[in-house]
Amino acid sequence: MSETAREPRSLTQVLKDRLKTTKEKLHPTHIENMSLRVQPGIKIDAPKAAIRGIQRAAIAMGRFEGRIAKMEGKKDASERVLTDFAQNYPGFLGFRSKDDNMLVSVYREAKVKYHNKELKKALGAASSAVIGEKLKVTFTIPLGHETGEGLLTSKKAQTHIERAIEDLNFPKAELKKILHTEIVPRYDEPILLELSENGQVELPPEAATVTDTLHVRITPIDKTLLQIPVAVNPSHSTSS
């Protein structure tokens, strides 16, 4: 299960995450050998009960991993504890618990749908540096190739492909049944991020729709141990 973030990030924030390595620091907790993984400069002041709650939830997720379908609901509920914590404490990336032999990652994935009209309006003269195009067919067309009629563009390639099919004596009306070509936009995200961070352009919310989802991944710290412990250590069972 994944959870959609209640407050999606801005397009600039998403591009930063995609194009830059996210560093992390370990923040100690009141639980022995358990540290929160956080973004640099972030300090999480969460109640003891909340910290113990995410620990128990992660242990439960490990216990339900690979079980039959009826256990999925319990696994989803445990995952929600971790994603809710991440929603409430920005900068939280998971935690590391040596005693439980688990490294827990809570991470965001974003789906970006650009809106060409609004993005071009925001970029102005810089549009041509950011927004390109490619022709989707069943084989690759090297756009920019020098032809006898100038540089090869998506539109020109599309026209020539359609003519070639027609030359094989297929009626024009039949083209759509046997040939599918599509000109789709291509975005140079490194340049877009650079323009935004340098203050050269302002990216309005309507330039793109961002759908943010939170995911949880649990991996053992010691790979020689085949599974995450299925029971809380005796020291963890004490109430906070």
Image (cartoon, grey):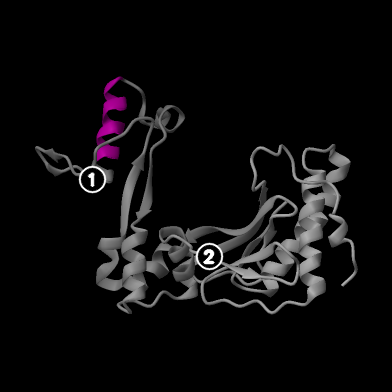
Q: Is residue 64 left or right of residue 174?
A: right
Closer to the camera in the image, 198 or 79: 79
Give above or below for 170 relative to 153: above
Task: Identify which residue is drawn at 33% across, 46% down.
Answer: 134
Where is residue 230? Give x, y as percent: 83, 46
Indicate yes or no whether the magenta region holds residue 47. no
Task: Identify which residue is drawn at 76% across, 55% down.
Answer: 58
Where is residue 232? Give x, y as percent: 85, 54
Where is residue 124? Give x, y as percent: 29, 72
Q: Secondary structure at mark 1?
A: loop
Closer to the camera in the image, 8 or 122: 8
Q: What are the residue bounds of the magenta stretch?
A: 157-168
Q: Secondary structure at mark 2?
A: loop
Amino acid bearing label 1: Thr
Task: Identify which residue is drawn at 80% across, 58% down.
Answer: 57
Amino acid bearing label 2: Glu
